[in-house]
Image (spheres, helix red, strand yellow):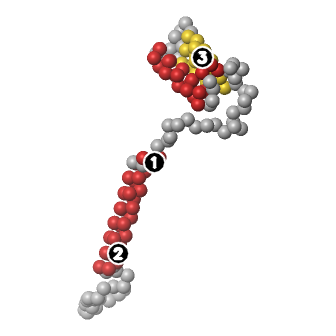
Amino acid sequence: MARRSAKKAPIITEAAPGRRGPGKAIWLIAAGLVAGIAGGIFGFRMLVPSRESEPAKAPQRQPEEILVREEPVEISTRMRPGEWTEASLLEHVEDYKQQIRDMGAKESQIVVDVERTEAGAARVVVSWDRSRA
């Protein structure tokens, strides 16, 4: 068993090695502020897109190797009852016609076929008939 001594432990007034002094604390605060500002800038740039990143509205030409001249082009969709109105149906047809025009079709080559079923569904097919002039 250890004996208890009457002497008190000496009081150490100097800083122990490894403790942070005021210089290290200021350095850590500055580094934290810089990291916080950089993170805020990054977050802001991710949330708010720049004006240059908007896509161009001009129609883009398809590469020649994608469009085979002999193959027909067709865009179609089926809509269930209640999913469409006459106005939305006309918008779909116009959108599909514009897509085919952007591929190079003339207005006389675009064929539109809209079928309505008795249950209220609709089938829209817009195609590019390349045999027409």
Tell me if label 1 and label 3 are in contact, CB under 8 Å. Answer: no
**Residue type (three-letter) at the residue carrying disc 3:** Val
- Image quadrant containing the N terminus: bottom left
As drawn, which residue projects farthest toward the right? Answer: 70
SS at badge 3: strand
- Image quadrant containing the C terminus: top right
Q: Which residue is mark 1?
A: 52
**Residue type (three-letter) at the residue carrying disc 1:** Glu
**Residue 112 numbered mark, or none:** 3
| Label whose residue precedes the other's in the sequence (3 or 2) | 2
Picture quarter containing residue 103? top right
Q: Which residue does the image show at 50% across and 41% down from the upper left? A: 55
Q: Which residue does the image show at 41% across and 52% down from the upper left? A: 45
Residue 66, horizontal then vertical, whole percent: 69, 36
- Compared with 25, 10 (above or below) is below
Disc 1 from disc 2: Cα separation: 38 Å
Most foreground residue, 132 or 46? 132
| Label whose residue precedes the other's in the sequence (1 or 3) | 1
Residue 77, horizontal then vertical, whole percent: 58, 22
Disc 3 from disc 2: Cα separation: 71 Å
Q: Which residue is mark 2?
A: 27
Most foreground residue, 97 or 12? 97
- Asked whether, in this view, residue 25 is left or right of residue 110, the answer is left
SS at badge 2: helix
Circle 2: is it few (<14), some (14-19), or many (20+) Cα within 10 Å?
few
Tell me if label 3 and label 2 are in contact, CB under 8 Å. Answer: no
Residue 86, horizontal then vertical, whole percent: 47, 14
Picture quarter containing residue 125? top right
Residue 15, horizontal then vertical, whole percent: 30, 85
- Compared with 56, 9 (above or below) is below
Viewer can see residue 127: no
